Image (cartoon, helix red, strand yellow):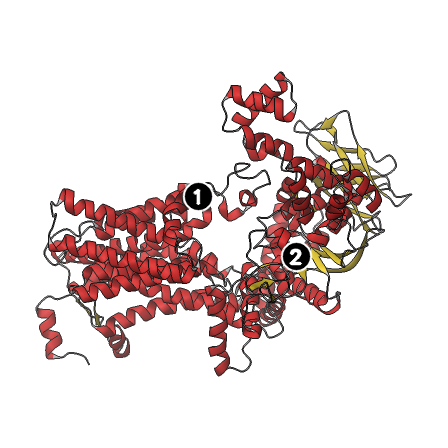
Amino acid sequence: MFETKETKNSLEDNTEEFVVSLKNLSKLKAILKFRLGSRSSKSSLIFLILITLIVSVWFRTLPARLPIAEEWAQNTVYNYFRNQIATQISQQYLNLPEINKQHIVNDEFQKFLDSNKDFINQQIKGLSQQYKEKLQDETGQTYLLAIDPYFYLRHAKHYLEKGISGTELIGGKYPVPEAAKIMYPNLDFSKPIDWDGQRMAPVGAPSKMTFHAYFIAYLHKIWGFFSKDQTLMRTSFYVPVILMSLATIPAFLIGRRFAGPIGGLVAAILVATNPFIMTRTAGGFSDTDSYNVLFPLLITWLFLEAFEKKKLKHKSIFASLSGFFVGVYSFAWGGWWYIFDFILAMMILYMAYLVIIKREFFTQKTKRTAILFIIFFAFSFIFTTLFTKSPYALMHALKAPIGFTKIKAVAETTIWPNIQTTVAELNPASLNTIMSSVGGKFVFLLGCIGVILSAFKKDEEGKLDIKLAILLIVWFAGTIYACTKGVRFILLFAPAFSVAFGVFAGNVYEYGSRWFKKGLHLSPALSKILILILIALILFKPVKAGYDTAYREVPSMNDAWYETLKKIDREAEPDAIVNSWWDFGHWFITIGNRRVTFDGAGQDRHMAYWIGRVLYTDDPDLAIGILRMVDCGNNNAFWVLNEKLNDTPKSIEILNKIVKMDRDKAKKELLKYLKSEEDAEEVLKWTHCKAPPNYFITSDDMIGKSGVWAHFGSWNFKRAAMYYYTHKLDKEEGIKLLKTKFNLTEDEAERIFYEIKTEDPNKWISGWPSYIGNSYASCKIENNITVKCANGLEVNLKTYNAFVLDRTGKPVHPAKLAYVDKKTKKFKVKTFKNNTIEGIAAALIPKGNNTYESIFMSPELVGSMFTRLFFFKAIGLEDKFTLWHEARQLTGGMIYVWKVKWD
């Protein structure tokens, strides 16, 4: 139906036209008949772009539909009926070997499935819906996938309601709390400051609207105009779906520019489906990561297009637009500078290539290239200055790579612990991890070939055009290095790789189809089809990995958490403070609507030590004392005390003493170190105030995070100070300083100095006590005396002697055992001194009705507050903690909310 004269002439002239013609499929023919040459029609390009948009949207909306719930439901239903059948078979054939029983069970189970299909499907469907509802709010909207999206959601909500991101304004004509002046001495309070009174409680923290919060707010306004029932959570959920769909367009245009439409299509498809990108940009992951794909690709495309335009006016427009979006990117994400630095490096290398290699000193190309770069640099400077409100933004971009290398440094700029060392996404990625993220070694190799092929592209004059090759090499090298500092930076590498692979695919399509035609004497259409099939086969693995990732994305929020926090919102006192480990702090504020001492935007400050210490300590008085101190003034007690002493380890030591004391005793202790009662009162204001109501949360996720909070909670400030002052000194100077500043003997100083120079500072300063395994082992009682647990622990309930088997099978004692005495009903810890297994302790946890569970752990955690609150439900701590609420999650893990009893 499209056989026009023009089309026939086009085929006869051997232009790059790809026509699919199948008998009785005229509609398919109408859809698929388009040009695939370098000068494809607009309708063809739109069609290809639509393909990438559809793929991106469909993949990223999978979490909204939660298809994984059907798999869970099927497994649950199948296992239930299989176990029923297995029980019957075991009873019927008592002496039959187990392997024979399994064959019978499998046969009977298959018969059961075949004869009860409708019933089984109905059970799966119903259970699947129940699972989905546990992961959705009351409107049926799937919860946001991660934690940080709730931070931006709340800012967007505040902006829509109040016109600011925080809860109030302070400074200028507005009153400024004294606590804020102490905690933020460098802030200029002469002007109004957007202030978030719910973060870093009870002080608050500066707040500002981000690009992402603006985007959510204005999208919600637009969407809400068409849908009255639109919720802000639903709007936020679909933001990454929209942004990543837009990101496929510049990826397509770059690939098309340098490798034709097929190159563009492949580049865009890989951007849309890359599994690592997917983990951070699927629907519901409403964070800034989508911008780290969209803006670098958009900036790169505009800059490269500026090169390709013939007229200086057009070059200037595209270069200035590229600079404009550098400015927008600087507003959207703090690490924006990397793409600017890559383009800067590319321009330096390209100019060197023109001048040194090509000997084009004052040619029109050299001059126009220089003009293009000046325009790009100038507009980048203008718009980064406007968006960041700092004229030093570009200077920061030049210096930032140096600071980036220190992101996980320990005790180099401060003796406080560095939270970044424990952020999972900042764990280094190996080259194998990087290659796996894009489809494996073979696909990675093909992408590298694409980089090489991009160097052989010729411009309109028939000369080599190596701009893209230089940029890709710089981009590859820079981001692969970044990945060695943190696995999250694979996100920055993936777009460049997608373009490089697109270049490879486009070249294979162009030259491979020609070879098939000439070498194998195949028709042009068949040659192209075979090459497309080959490319599709190569793409299958990475695209499938992207699908599997999206398919398995589920929110970390669930009904148990949501209802727990809604209860806090409804019933907790308005001035209450919620304390827990920092991960879910954004949830506590956004859903619980209460203040928190720290969260995911403030975990790098000092609460990691104090809250970690609460969880780690085995001293209930210390735990309560610290909670009172942080609820009185966050870290202000330390700031005030250390300003007078100028000795961080000593200040921390004193605070750990006085928070356990009553006010009078604490004052006497302080006067040993301070000059006056006035100075002491100034500290006591932040340690012994009338604290607001406190809700302390322990949850099962904190078991797996125990190594982190215990690491910070046991942080040795004296050792940190030793490292801080001596790690850059030579042996003679270092030993001398250790002796004079820390009162060490010659031998002690020499030993410590050697350890500082040879050991990992993070491990040397503080250990990583943790629970062994994230779940408990079930136990059974034999003869009402001996408890035997699935993990190998055996405990005599009369003597509370405990045994485990060592590697040789010999019974030995754990270092310690935590238990509840059956007679006294008190929590106790028994220490074994002889015949023990080093580094292993255990807890025997009563579960009611004479049943027990057990878990192994580092000995330091046996009597810790987390062990006693979470595993033993505050037995023996009733005078300090009251169980206010508990909830069981979909996974079975528990959430406990404790209300602190102040003295």
Residue 611: x and y, percent? 68, 48
The quadrant in which the N terminus is found is bottom left
Which amino acid type is shown beneath numbered disc 2?
Val
- The residue singled out by tag 2 in the image is 203
Height in image: 784 above or below 839?
Answer: below
Q: What residue type is labelled 1?
A: Gly
Q: Mark 1 points at which residue?
A: 403
Q: Residue at x 54, y 47 (%)?
A: 423
874 left or right of 859 in image? right
Q: Which of the 4 image quadrants contains residue 204?
A: bottom right
Identity of the residue drawn at 66% across and 66% down: 593
Disc 2 is placed on an element classified as loop
Instruction: Point out residue 585 in the picture as x, y percentages from the top left corner.
Output: 62, 57
Q: Splitting the image into 4 quarters, where does residue 231 fall?
A: bottom right
Residue at 54 percent across and 42 percent down: it is: 421
| Relative depth, front residue between 889 and 809 | 889
Q: Is residue 97 visible?
A: no
